[in-house]
Image (cartoon, rainbow, N blue to C red):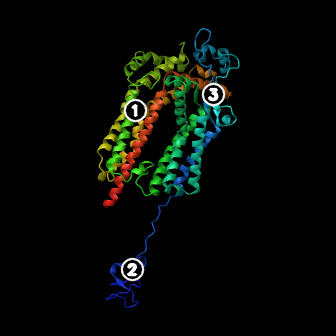
C-alpha cells in the first residue's frame, strides 16, 4: 500500500511517515495522488486564426452589392408594336444584326425604331434606391442588402473573436446562414419577385410577362459568381471548423440537431421523406411546362426541331461568325439551333444527374446505425447527399445559363452586332449587351413555374442532406458509447 499524500510505502492502514490513510499502489505517483478527487478541466479544441481568416474575408465579399448596379429595368415600350403590327424589339434586333446598318451607332438605331431620346435600359443600384429613383425594387433591394450586411457582420465577428463564436451552436447557425444567404441573395430576391408577380399579375403567365422587363445587371451576375465561388467553399470550411470546435463528427444545423436524442430510424424516416420530395421535383419537370418551350417530355419534338437541318444550320453559324453570311434573320439562325440542341439534351442530363441520387436514397434506406460511422463509403454518401439531390433540380437552370452566356459572348464579339459595340461609350455597349441578353432569354430558358419548383427542390434537398448528417451524428454517438 502507498500513501496518497507523500508516496511512502506502508503495510498498515495509515502511513508510518505522515499518518494519512494509505490506498492501493495505483495511486503511488505523488502527482497522481494530488489530483485524486479533483475533476479534470475539459480542454477546448484550438481554433487557429489561419483557418478562419479566408472564410471571414469571404463573408465580407457580398458587401460589394451595396456599391454596384444590381438590377436592370427595361422600358415598358420595349415590346410595343409599330404601325404595321411588328414588334419594335424584333425590328431593332434585326437592324442590329443586319450588315446594312453596320455604320449606325446603337443610339441611332434605337432612336430610329422607338423615337428620339428613348432609353430602353436603366440600371438600378442601392444608391439609386436611397435617392428615391428605384422604389419599385424596394423589397428585393432591401433583401439583398440585409443579407449582405448580415454576412459582413458575421465575418467581422469571426476575426474579432478568433473564430471562438463557432463553439456556440447558435452563432455557428447564424454564420453559416449569413454566408449562404448572401451568396445566393440575388436568386432569392428573383424568386420572391416572381412570387409577388404571380399574386399581383394574375398567375404564372402574368409573372412571366412582367419578368421580361426585369433582369440582373452584368455587375450583379459577376459578383454573384464571385460570391458563390468563394462563399460556398468557405461555408463548407466553417462547417468543418464548427464541428471540430463542438467535438462532433459533422455540423448539424438547427432544427435537425433537436432530433439528436431520437432514434436512428426516426431520423432516417425524416431524411427519406425530404429526399422523396426532392426527387419528385425533377420528375415534375417531365410533365409541367417549366421551360419556355414546354415540358421535358417534348424531347421528341425538340429533336425533330434541332437535328434535321443541323449541318445546314452549322454552316450558317460558321458563315455568320466568319462575317460571310447573307442570312436575313441572322441572330435567329444562330441562336435557335443551339438552344434547341440544349433543350434536347435536358432529358439525358436529368437522367445522368438522377443516377447518384438513386444511390444516395438507397444508402439512406439500407444503412445501419452500428456500421454507418465506421464505414468510410457510407459516411461520404451521407455527407454528399444534399449536393447530389440538388443537381437534377438545378440542371435546367445551370445548362441554359451556360448556353445563354456563350451565345451572348458570340453575338457580342462574332456577329454583326459587334459593329455597334463601342467601348468608348460604356452606356451604348451595356445597352447592346442587355438587349442581346433579353433576346436570348426570350428564345428559350426557365420560367416562373420552374423558379418556384426549383426553390422547393433545393430546400428539401438541403433538409434531406441535414437529415443524413444527423444520421451520421447519431451513429457516432452510439459508436462512442460502445467503446
Residue 90: x %, y % from top left? 57, 16
Label 3: element kind:
helix
Which quadrant is home to the C terminus? bottom left
Q: Residues within 10 Å of mark 3 (few under 14, many from 20)?
A: some
Label 1: element kind:
helix
Residue drawn at x 42%, y 17% as measured from the top left: 305
Label whose residue precedes the other's in the sequence (2 or 1): 2
Looking at the rendered image, the disc whose residue lies closer to the viewer, 2 or 1, is 1
Disc 3: which residue? 430
Label 2: element kind:
loop
Label whose residue precedes the other's in the sequence (1 or 3): 1
Which quadrant is home to the N terminus? bottom left
Residue 70: x %, y % from top left? 61, 34
Q: Residues within 10 Å of mark 1 (few under 14, many from 20)?
A: many
Disc 2: which residue? 29
Disc 1: which residue? 281
Amino acid at each position: 500500500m502507498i500513501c496518497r499524500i507523500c508516496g511512502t510505502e506502508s503495510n498498515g492502514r495509515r502511513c508510518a511517515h505522515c499518518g494519512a490513510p494509505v490506498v492501493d499502489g495505483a495511486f503511488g505517483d505523488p502527482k497522481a495522488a494530488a489530483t485524486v478527487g479533483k475533476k479534470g478541466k475539459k480542454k477546448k479544441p484550438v481554433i487557429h486564426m489561419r483557418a478562419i481568416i479566408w472564410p471571414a474575408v469571404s463573408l465580407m465579399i457580398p458587401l460589394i452589392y451595396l456599391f454596384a448596379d444590381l438590377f436592370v429595368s427595361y422600358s415598358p415600350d420595349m415590346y410595343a408594336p409599330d404601325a404595321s403590327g411588328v414588334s419594335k424589339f424584333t425590328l431593332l434586333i434585326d437592324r442590329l444584326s443586319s450588315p446594312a446598318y453596320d455604320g449606325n451607332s446603337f443610339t441611332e438605331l434605337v432612336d430610329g425604331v422607338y423615337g428620339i431620346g428613348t432609353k430602353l435600359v436603366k440600371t438600378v443600384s442601392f444608391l439609386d434606391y436611397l435617392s428615391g429613383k428605384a422604389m419599385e425594387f424596394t423589397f428585393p433591394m432591401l433583401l439583398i442588402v440585409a443579407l449582405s450586411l448580415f454576412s459582413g457582420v458575421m465575418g467581422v465577428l469571426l476575426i474579432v473573436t478568433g473564430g471562438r463564436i463557432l463553439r456556440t451552436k447558435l452563432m455557428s447557425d447564424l454564420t453559416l446562414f449569413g454566408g449562404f444567404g448572401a451568396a445566393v441573395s440575388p436568386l432569392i430576391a428573383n424568386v420572391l419577385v416572381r412570387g409577388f408577380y404571380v399574386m399581383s399579375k394574375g398567375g404564372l403567365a402574368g409573372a412571366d410577362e412582367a419578368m421580361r422587363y426585369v433582369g440582373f445587371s452584368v455587375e450583379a451576375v459577376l459578383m454573384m459568381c464571385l460570391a458563390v465561388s468563394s462563399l460556398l467553399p468557405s461555408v463548407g470550411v466553417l462547417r468543418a471548423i464548427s464541428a471540430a470546435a463542438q467535438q462532433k463528427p459533422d455540423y448539424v444545423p438547427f432544427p435537425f440537431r433537436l432530433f439528436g436524442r431520437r432514434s436512428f430510424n426516426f431520423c432516417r424516416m425524416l431524411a427519406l421523406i425530404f429526399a422523396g420530395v426532392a426527387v419528385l421535383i425533377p420528375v415534375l419537370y417531365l410533365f409541367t411546362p417549366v421551360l419556355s418551350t414546354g415540358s421535358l417530355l417534348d424531347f421528341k419534338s425538340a429533336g425533330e426541331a434541332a437535328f434535321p437541318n443541323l449541318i445546314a444550320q452549322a454552316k450558317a453559324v460558321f458563315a455568320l461568325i466568319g462575317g460571310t453570311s447573307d442570312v436575313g434573320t441572322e441572330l435567329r439562325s444562330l441562336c435557335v439551333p443551339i438552344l434547341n440542341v440544349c433543350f434536347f439534351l435536358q432529358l439525358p442530363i436529368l437522367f445522368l444527374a438522377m443516377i447518384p441520387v438513386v444511390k444516395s436514397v438507397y444508402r439512406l434506406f439500407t444503412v445501419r446505425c452500428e456500421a454507418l460511422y465506421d464505414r468510410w463509403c457510407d459516411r461520404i454518401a451521407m455527407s454528399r447527399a444534399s449536393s447530389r439531390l440538388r443537381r437534377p433540380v438545378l440542371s435546367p437552370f445551370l445548362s441554359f445559363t451556360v448556353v445563354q452566356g456563350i451565345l451572348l459572348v458570340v453575338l457580342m464579339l462574332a456577329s454583326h452586332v459587334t459593329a455597334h459595340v463601342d467601348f468608348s461609350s460604356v452606356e451604348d455597349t451595356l445597352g447592346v449587351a442587355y438587349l442581346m441578353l433579353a433576346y436570348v432569354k426570350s428564345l428559350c430558358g426557365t420560367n416562373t413555374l420552374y423558379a418556384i419548383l426549383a426553390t422547393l427542390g433545393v430546400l428539401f434537398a438541403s433538409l434531406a442532406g441535414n437529415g443524413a448528417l444527423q444520421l451520421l451524428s447519431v451513429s457516432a454517438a452510439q459508436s462512442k458509447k460502445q467503446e
